[in-house]
Amino acid sequence: MQVFRSLDEARGRFGPCAVTIGNFDGTHIGHQELFREVALLANVHRWAPAVLTFDPHPARIVAPERAPKRLSTHEERVAVMSDCGIERVLILPFDAALAAVAPDAFVREILVGALGAKAVIVGDNFRFGHKHAGNIHLLADLGRELGFATHIEPAIRFRGVVVSSTEVRNAITSGRVGFAGRLLGRPYALAGSVVSGHGIGAKQTVPTLNLAAENEVLPMAGVYITRTRDLDGERRWNSITNIGMRPTFDGDALTIETFLLSPFDGATPARIAVEVLRRVRDERKFESPEALKAQIFRDVARANAYHRRVASL
């Protein structure tokens, strides 16, 4: 996998290629299908299977008030692309100058001139160039003129829903994390550093790992069955996680507290990823820490039953 971060860096080293273009936030199953189609076509013709994407999201430049919250980092996206057979990625810095490039110039100067595109594979809602003036029909016309093939892929549907980054965000923020995982093709994970908590859990309820998540999109407040990974090692644990304001203790800030269902050896992990698998219940205020602790153990029993069931499949 080669990752380029400027047009000058990629020029002359990127193509000839079959390429798909987009933001690919979340790299959901629709994106993955595009990547696999790119890799299949490229391998037939011995071109490089490639992706052109942007940083930041173009909306953050042209309409920041409407810019969506980020589901995944570019590093996470590149990893999924690699798994699907992509070998070259250009993460093109997006600024006002690039936003002003006309659709015709975008294709001639960037796709063909700089990147050596021999085939362009995009979804049927693809738009490009200044003010999104370019569409799949213009792309096909330019392909015939400039000598590259244009392949238009229909939208992927799951349970009657068109798979999109917006649909993934909506599922996560409404607590439908299992459905979000189906759209992503993997569980949605909250990742970041383990930080010190208030010490209440260790003293009054159960000890937890407190996560300072780097994600911009968080599940709605509640208790979730999870799986936790040590990002600096190979350790993994089944777990249960509370996302919320700790109302029993009059909390005033959102916390993400994960209770591991099995002990771990060695030092407390510095960085973890918490894969959010299934919602258990709403967060609520209990009359006492003891009542909360009793509920936590009931939640743990449900989580253990879930993990046993999944392990037996």
Image (spheres, rainbow, N blue to C red):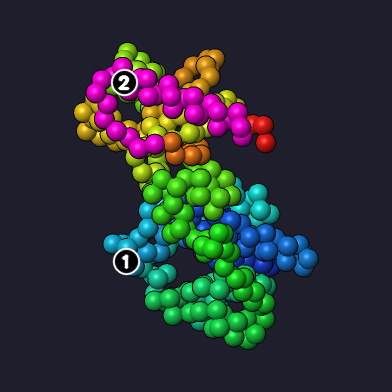
**What's the residue at 66%, 67% (across, down)?**
18
Residue closer to the observer: 92 or 224: 224
* SS at circle 2: helix
Q: Residue at x 51, y 72 (%)?
A: 126
| Label annotation for residue 63 | 1
Residue 234 has which mark?
A: none
- Tell whether 18 sits left or right of 111: right
Q: Residue at x 57, y 59 (%)?
A: 158
Residue 185 on the magenta segment: no
Element marked by disc 1: loop
What residue range appears in magenta? 281-310
Left or right, 268 with respect to 39, comes to left
Q: Position of residue 250 (x, y in %)?
A: 21, 28
Left or right of 258? Residue 244 is left
The residue carrying mark 2 is: 291
Image label count = 2
Task: Point out the image quarter for the C terminus.
Answer: top right
**Depth-wise, is mark 2 or mark 1 nearer the camera?**
2
**Above/below status of 188 relative to 106:** above
Q: Would residue 88 be seen by someone viewing this image from the given angle?
A: no
Pick whichever, 278 or 181, lies toward us. 278
Mark 2 and mark 1 lie on one chain; the one further toward the N terminus is: 1
Residue 103 coordinates in the image, percent (x, y):
48, 79
Q: Residue 25: image x %, image y %?
A: 48, 55
Query: Residue 109's image quarter?
Result: bottom right
Residue in the image at 53% along x and 43% along y: 187
Which residue occupies the foreground of this view, 261 or 294? 294
